Image (cartoon, helix red, strand yellow):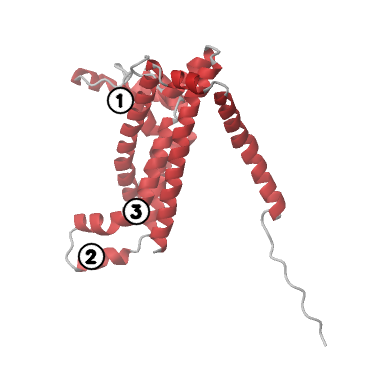
Amino acid sequence: MTSAAAPIRAKRVLPGFTLSLGTTLLYITVIILIPVLALILKGAEIGPARFWAIVSSPRAVAAFQVTLIAAAIATVFNALYGLLMAWVLVRYEFPGKRILDALMDVPFALPTAVAGLSLTALFSSNGWIGAWLEPQGISVVYTIWGIALAMAFTSVPFVVRTVQPVLEDLDPGYEQAARTLGASEATIFTRVVFPQILPAWLAGCTIAFARSLGEFGAIVFIAGNLPFQTEIAALLAFIRLEEFDYNGAAAIALVLLFFALVLLLVSNRLQAWAARHRGA
């Protein structure tokens, strides 16, 4: 009589749960939690009155306004362009499609300082594009439009890469049924396709907006960094550090951190909604 076969243990690619979880928590603690905690503690040393005086000063308020307005402009552009690019990459076949698809990830790989220098060279008064825009009375470099351009360049992949997989997974049967019923292409997109990709699209736009708020390297070259005009909040925090005003830098950074956490919460909510939407 043969003995019962011993249970076969499933092979794991990664180490055991304890080691994996410990490594993950260590990384999160060292790279994320400790710097954020240090920033919060540094800001707490200031006190409410001093903190409010720093963040409500005219220069700080102007920097926050420039940052938020430019990020909003960049997000609106990315919302439209990113959706269009994702649609083209998913729904059409053409020569060079793979190259265009790969180019969407260039902002991830390209150093932001290099991107800022390149955009400044292109859109300056003697650049390839700026030389044509300047006679038309359109200035990009050293304006809020230049800031929005740099933000859009660095954050557009978030919209494309968020919407693209959802478009690829859509069931074409719904669109075919709509065509059978006589719906136009515009009606099919607005009534059938867009509601299905809406959660992912909103999540991508939220992440792109958060990325724009934190952008620094691509902006400092094209903005001109003029106080009350083209000075962003991240740059003002950097200036306060150069002036050894650590409390001022911490206060401004805490406001940016607050915006980032709020947007992170919104993005997670939208992604959860998207998951439930796809499941339904």
Disc sitting over residue 145 in the figure = 1
Which percent across, then down, holds residue 121?
A: 36, 20
Name the kind of residue labelled 3 in the image.
Ile
Name the kind of residue labelled 2 in the image.
Ala
Disc sitting over residue 120 in the figure = none
- 1 and 2 marks in contact (CB < 8 Å): no
- Which element is circle 2 on? helix
Q: Identify the residue at image location x=44%, y=39%.
A: 262
Residues under labels 1 and 2: Cα distance? 41 Å
Residue in front for this viewpoint, 23 or 245: 245
- Sequence-wise, which precedes: disc 1 or disc 2? 1
- Sequence-wise, which precedes: disc 1 or disc 3? 1
Q: Can you tell which quarter of the image residue 137 is in?
A: top left
Residue with the most extreme bottom position: 1
Disc sitting over residue 197 in the figure = 3
Residue that mark 2 sits on: 178
Which percent across, then down, holds residue 204?
A: 39, 44
